[in-house]
Image (cartoon, rainbow, N blue to C red):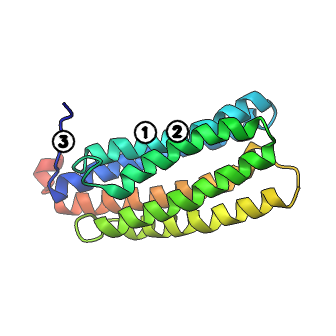
Amino acid sequence: MQTITLLSPPSQNKWLQSYYYLRATASIIWILLALFIGKHHSAVGAALLILYPAWDAFANYLDARQSGGLTANPPQKWNVVVSLLIALAIIWALSVSINATIKVFGLWAIFSGVLQLSASVRRWKASDGQWAMMLSGAQSTLAGGFMFKQASSGMALDVTTVAPYAAFGVVYFLISAISLTIKNNRKTPPLARQ
């Protein structure tokens, strides 16, 4: 039986602060691997394209566990499902072409962006730092459409096509994390910080 954790708003803000730093760090590592290894080794690039939505599924699962569980958080539940299905679809698309793979990735960016936007809107009143996550969700949707269009054009693509998308994610996660860090420190009495 799964234990469901319900956090108070201050504890939720602390969790989200750590969570957003974790997401930013993971994206930075992914970008570095894509630029310096994946671009030159197609097998590594392929693995990174599968790993991105798979990690997103796991991260959404972790976040939902700290926010009442998947049942209480439909956008995150659907993000887990969609991201896992897309990871499997990317495995298939890699056998077709890199352009087909980027199309699938673009579709995922659209759906996950809408779901992230929905999750952020749901958290708006209870948690701080959500405006950047709302922008991130909207930007993800637009970037997904752009990636799909690129892949449809027939231009030569590789794993680094996704790097700008991941970089914008880093920026939004860091904005939210830093915003929460500032707000959490203001709310914490000075003696409790020591």
Give whichever of 86, 131 is nearer the camera: 86
**Quarter occupied by the N terminus:** top left
Residue 164, given in percent of the width and then of the height, sits at 67, 56
Q: Which residue is mark 1?
A: 58
x and y, in percent, of residue 53 in the image: 55, 44
Q: Residue 54, labelled with which disc?
A: 2
The amino acid marked with disc number 1 is Phe
Query: Of 93 and 161, which appears nearest the observer?
Result: 93
Horizontal side, residue 88 vs residue 44: left or right: left
Which residue is depicted at the point 81% across and 59% down?
Answer: 152
Between the residue at mark 2 and the residue at mark 1, the CA separation in whole angstroms equals: 6 Å
Residue projecting furthest to the right: 155
Disc 1 from disc 3: Cα separation: 16 Å
Q: Nearer the viewer, residue 19 or 193?
A: 19
Left or right of 185, for residue 94: right
Residue under pointer 3: 4
Q: Secondary structure at mark 3?
A: loop
Q: Position of residue 60 (x, y in %)?
A: 40, 47
The residue that appears at 86% across and 61% down in the rendered structure is: 153
